Amino acid sequence: MTVNGQHRQIEVARDLEALAKTLAHSTRNVPAPFDSYTLLGELAATVDHIEQVCRQLAAWHASVVDGTHYAGEDGRGDGATGTVTAAAELERAAVALDTASAAVRAAHSANGVVRWFDAAE
């Protein structure tokens, strides 16, 4: 079930990070090889969602107004504001995640033709 977590965004992001770390540590081996297909499908969907988050945060950063959403910036002297730079970098991240998603989906598709055993021998 999808829940609107607008007031829990930081909590949800921390949970996602913790779960991603757990997954990273647990995938050094796949004890049930047939699970690898489902794992890749779930990973592709997750990357898609993170891409969406980056695009939405990019749009939000591009639309914020000095004096309404924030009180100025610390000067860097580079002529670019932090919000504009953050928006551009988040959009760049979204493009990279789109590329990553395509690669994971291709791996998922390739994995789908393998006749896996129920358990590693």
Image: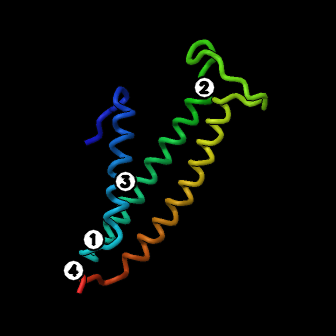
Q: Amino acid at mark 2?
A: Ser
Q: Is residue 22 above or below residue 71?
A: below
* Labels 4 and 3: the sequence-earlier one: 3
Extreme-top residue of the structure: 67
Give residue 30's quadrant in the image. bottom left
The N terminus appears in which quarter of the rendering?
top left
Q: Is residue 102 left or right of residue 67?
A: left
The residues tagged by marks 4 and 3 sit, at their Cα atoms, a distance apart of 24 Å
Amino acid identity at mark 4: Ala
Please name the residue shown 60% across and 25% down the image.
63
Q: In the structure shown, which secondary structural element does the residue marked by tag 2 occupy? A: helix
- The residue where tag 1 is placed is 35
Q: Secondary structure at mark 1?
A: helix
| Numbered tag placed on residue 20 in the rendering | 3
Of the numbered discs 1 and 4, the one sitting upstream in the chain is 1
The residue under label 4 is 119
**Residue 17 position within the rendered picture, expressed as x and y whole percent measured from the top left:** 38, 47
Residue type at numbered disc 1: Asp
Of 21 and 91, nearer the camera is 21
Q: CA gap, disc 1 to disc 4?
A: 9 Å
Between circles 2 and 4, the one closer to the viewer is 4
- Please identify the quarter of the rendering in which residue 83 is found: top right
Task: Identify the mark nearer the N-term, 2 or 4.
Answer: 2
In space, the residues marked 2 and 1 are separated at their CA atoms by 42 Å
